[in-house]
Image (cartoon, coloured by chain):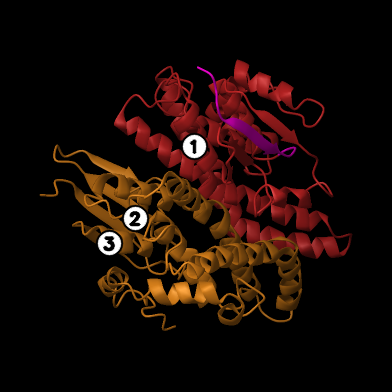
Chain colours: A red, B orange
């Protein structure tokens, strides 16, 4: 089948956009990767506002054969849209209605619950590091109280929740989050799972590898997928993406 | 049509659950409202973990005629599920494909982008109020820096983004977020819009009524909808829900 739509993904390093590259590779569609670097280490370039009003990555453009361009933001929506329109082989099609519900649930959960907790911890930790000693001690104390009062226990609870899900799957000899094949749940959850593993001790009090071995195994598995590795190679030189679980 | 599924919504005061009550009233389905109070003003009761592993509201149970019970969390998913299964009259059905895309986008945006910013501000402000003078001055300084460095400008940008959308709609004589009828976008965005209006000066630096008049008008409109008012009456005595825009 000839692909008529021109797809462009607007991408920045160490961002939510890399999981969309993974999905595009899994779907086997043709796409253009617009890569830029971040400004001052963390900010999106102002130019990104040309591509979508909120100017943050990922942004997806879909140019239709008549020349109209659809401009999308929100990872959960982009993943849902790409699978709905370009999964021509049914690779991502849920097998049962229960699987469909769980996949849709996790699609919303990833950015609606898990990711805000990790961002909350990150923002506070950046703040704590941004001031010099001895003020930094005070800032660390305050930030520590906010984290221990809300973000840290919530993040720990959610890492356990995800690990429990994977443990039940592994017990059935399955490696993905839902059913026995890859789904939008894996694409969406790959980003927060990666953040938890890579920031070992940052998102959880307990060491991830020892305390959440099913999540750790899952991370080994997804980062060894051929499409994941092809996605990592696409951004080589711009970003370091873990492959084969090697941190 | 006889409704075969038994629907139960698990609800707490001043939470994301009230917009689900609004949706259930709009859909005209039968449902049971399980209402409890919060613990120590902000926490969900431990008992809620019986209803869903993460134990936070909203939780939706759907009991099928064969006795099986589906247990759901995530506002965006619950809204999508209820409309997919119980919108028997097509009230929420998008008119065009572009409308569908925008509705699905806003469904993800509400909890994926807007709400985490408002929660970030809230958590920090609760922290700043939780300690006594003179320590509170230090805490306020630190929290103020975190807010002004990230949450506040992001929240302001997003309030403007939403107001711009509504302004364009109002210019066409339309009162809803997408197209010319109510959609999942309105249900989902009603919660953050309400938070912005009610916490005037908390989520934005600029006064909402004067600086974002289209959002303010929208708030008057949705809180005057008959189904919104019925939803407010359902929780009378447990929560104060704004009706007819009266704060």
Element on which disc 3 rests: helix
Towards the viewer: A102 or A172 = A102
Spatial separation of the CA atoms under disc 2 and disc 1: 37 Å
- Quadrant position of the C terminus of chain A in the picture: top right
When asked about the image quadrant of residue B71, the answer is: top left
Please give the residue where the numbered disc 3 appears in the rendered image: B26
| Looking at the image, residue B98 lies above or below residue A93 | below
The spot of residue A24 in percent (x, y) is 59, 27
Please report the bounds of the magenta region as a residue range: A1-14
Say whether residue B210 is visible.
Answer: yes
Task: Identify the mark nearer the N-term, 3 or 2.
Answer: 3
Report which residue position mark 1 lands on.
A81
Q: What is the secondary structure assignment of the residue under circle 2?
A: helix
Is residue A196 within the magenta segment? no
- The residue at the point 35 percent across, 74 percent down is B239
In depth, the one of B139 and B67 nearer the eye is: B67
Label 1 Cα crowd, 10 Å radius (few <14 / some 14-19 / many 20+): some
- Expressed as whole percent of the image width and height from the top left, the position of residue B91 reads 28, 55
> Mark 1 — on which chain does it sit?
A
Query: In the displayed structure, would residue B113 be above or below residue B212?
Result: above
- Mark 1: secondary structure: helix
Viewer-side residue, B95 vs B136: B95
Q: Which residue is mark 2?
A: B47
What residue sits 55% from the left and 80% below the top? B209
Tell if the residue under mark 2 belongs to the same chain as the one under mark 1.
Answer: no
Q: Quadrant of residue A21?
A: top right
Question: Disc 3 to disc 1, how far (Cα)?
Answer: 26 Å
Q: Residue at x 67, y 19 (%)?
A: A230
Task: Pick the residue in front: B12 or A57.
Answer: A57
């Amino acid at each position: 089948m000839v692909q008529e739509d021109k797809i462009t993904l607007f991408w920045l390093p160490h961002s939510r956009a890399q999981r969309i590259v993974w999905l595009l590779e899994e779907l086997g569609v043709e796409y253009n990767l617009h890569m830029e670097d971040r400004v001052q280490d963390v900010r999106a370039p102002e130019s990104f506002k040309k591509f979508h009003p909120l100017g943050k990555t990922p942004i997806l453009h879909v140019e239709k054969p008549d020349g109209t361009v659809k401009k999308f933001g929100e990872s959960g929506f982009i993943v849902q849209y790409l699978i709905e329109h370009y999964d021509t082989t049914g690779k991502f099609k849920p097998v049962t209605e229960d699987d469909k519900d769980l996949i849709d649930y996790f699609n919303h959960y990833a950015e609606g619950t898990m990711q805000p907790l990790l961002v909350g911890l990150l923002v506070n930790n950046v703040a704590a590091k941004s001031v010099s000693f001895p003020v930094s001690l005070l800032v660390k104390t305050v930030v520590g109280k906010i984290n221990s009062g809300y973000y840290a226990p919530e993040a720990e609870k959610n890492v356990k929740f995800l690990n429990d899900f994977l443990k039940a799957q592994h017990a059935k000899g399955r490696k993905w989050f839902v059913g026995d094949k890859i789904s939008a749940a894996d694409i969406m959850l790959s980003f927060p799972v990666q953040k938890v593993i890579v920031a070992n001790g940052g998102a959880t009090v307990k060491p991830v590898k020892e305390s959440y071995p099913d999540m750790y195994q899952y991370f080994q598995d997804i980062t060894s997928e051929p499409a994941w590795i092809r996605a990592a190679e696409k951004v080589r030189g711009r970003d370091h993406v873990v492959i084969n679980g090697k941190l």
